[in-house]
Each structure stands twice: as C-alpha cells, then as structure tokens.
Amino acid sequence: MDTISDFSGTTQTALLRDYLSLAAGSSAIQRVRAAGLAMWEVDGGRLLDVGSGNGEVARELSALLPEAEVTAVDHSADAVATASGLHDGSRVSYEVGDAYALPYPDGHFDGVRSERVLQHLAEPDRAVAEMARVLRPGGRLLLIDTEWQSFRVDGSPENFNEECLALLMEWQARARSVDSPPSGRTLRRRLVTAGLTDVRTEPVTLVFTDLAEAAPIMPIGAEMFAYVGMEDRAAGWLADLERAVADGTFLVTLTIWVAAGTR
C-alpha cells in the first residue's frame, strides 16, 4: 500500500497534492501564514521557501514583494513539476532540493521559511541548521509547524476525544505521514539550538464547529481511515462524530506554531 507521501524521496501522491491545495485555500491556514509573515519581517531580497509543495506561498510572496527573488525548493520532483505547472509569470524559481543539503552557498538568502515540513523529518535539527547556513547574517528564519498532540474534539457523546487522539496517532503511524507529532512546540528550541537570536514564538489555535471547514486541515473523515485500512477500528468513533455533527455539538481544535529567529 502506498503511503500518503514519501517526504524522504521524490514522489508526491495525488492525495497529497489535493490536501495541500485545499489547506492553502482555507482561511485557517491563511491566518497562520499571515502570523508568520508578520513575524518574519522580510521586505524583499532573496527569499527561500523550503518544502514548498505546490508553490502557492512562493507566488504569494512574489506578488507581495515584486522586487524579491523567490526560490521554491522541494525534495519531491513531482511537487516541483506541479508547482512549475502553476507558475504565473512572477519572479519565482522552482527547484528540487534536499532540506538536509540545500544546494545554495552560505549566506545566500535574506529570508528563509519552512512550513509544516519539520514534522515529517527524522532529523529536524539538521534541516534547521542547514536553513540557517544559507541565511545571511541578520536574515530571518521562519518556521511554521503543527502540534498534532494538541488535536482535540468535543461533542456528544463527551467521551470520544481520547479515542480520537489515539486513532489519529495510529493513522499517522500507518500512513508514515508524521515523524514528530509534537513538532510545533519544539520550534523555539530548535531555533535557539541552531544559534539564532531574537527568537519569537506564537501559537495559532484553530477552532472549528463545522466539519467541512475542519476537513482541509485535519484528517478525521471516513476516507482517511479507509486509506490506511482502519475502517473497522474507527467505525464506532466515526458514528459518534456523525452524531455530534448532527446535533450541533461538534468542536475541534488544533494548534499550529509560528516561530522566527535572526542569524
């Protein structure tokens, strides 16, 4: 069975492409990215987006800062091809590259960012050190990542939250989609360990009372469990979820962390 993505290789499944596209269009992710942009404090120059996926952030940066030179780098050749196919003529270049060995000289960029990437890496500190290496002195490094252990649901019946978290952790293990569920809250430590200064951190808590609004961000539907063969394991919880949605008591929260530091 294929996994949702091979973050250590060069493939990108259609499911991942669709997920990234839906998430990018959600107001929740747009709010997280706005918080990150405010903390990043870049005004142009050479900018690098590591783990750029479909490339929408790089294009948005180019539109916002038309004099900037934006590089979108991803380890997946499929992702780079998808992003290149969506190119809008802005000053963005799309390149294949490894977060552990970025193909750029020391101090090359004025600003580097990486969003929801470290959670997928076996050696996140190694990637942060590499991002710091290609950043010029005085440049800003922005990290954004999810803390999946903050994922909580509520509704009727009131006792189905604990089972939900257990199901999510099992799903992530089977899909091999997340190496570090608590990644978001580790960002400050990783920036400090990499030698960055003026480190600032902000949690952005997402709250949904509508399942359709939550779906682009949080994998809690029947299709997700079916993808990794967990239909039977999740059947009872999904029935409880449907009842909570039907009676209007459904609520789900998740925290995504934003952190930035100066080299």
Image (cartoon, rainbow, N blue to C red):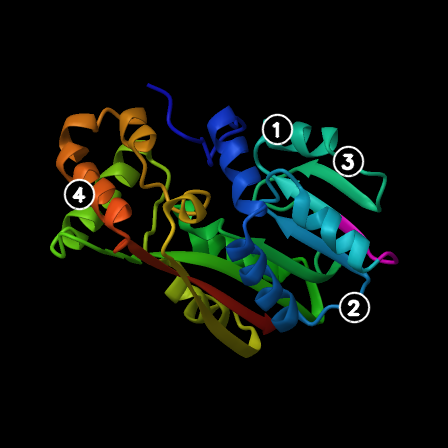
Q: Residue type at mark 3?
A: His
Q: For residue 253, which quarter of the picture? A: bottom left
Q: From the top left corner, tell me how far across and down residue 204 is, in percent.
A: 46, 67
Upstream in the sequence, badge 1 or badge 2? 2
Q: From the top left corner, tell me how far across and down residue 72 is, in percent.
A: 69, 44
| As drawn, 83 above or below 241 | above
Upstream in the sequence, badge 2 or badge 4? 2
> Of discs 2 and 4, which sits in the foreground?
4
Closer-to-camera residue (188/227):
227
100 relative position to 102: left or right? left
Give the secondary structure at mark 4.
helix
The span from disc 4 to disc 3 (Cα, nearest Å) is: 43 Å
228 relative position to 255: left or right? left
120 relative position to 103: left or right? left
Give the secondary structure at mark 2.
loop
Question: Which residue is the site of mark 1?
Answer: 77
Question: Which residue is the site of mark 4?
Answer: 240
Q: Residue type at mark 2?
A: Asp
> Of discs 3 and 1, which sits in the foreground?
3
Question: Which residue is the site of mark 3?
Answer: 87
The residues colored magenta run 66-70
The span from disc 3 to disc 2 (Cα, nearest Å) is: 22 Å
Q: For residue 251, which quarter of the picture? A: bottom left
Q: Residue type at mark 4?
A: Asp
Q: Residues within 10 Å of mark 1 (few under 14, many from 20)?
A: some
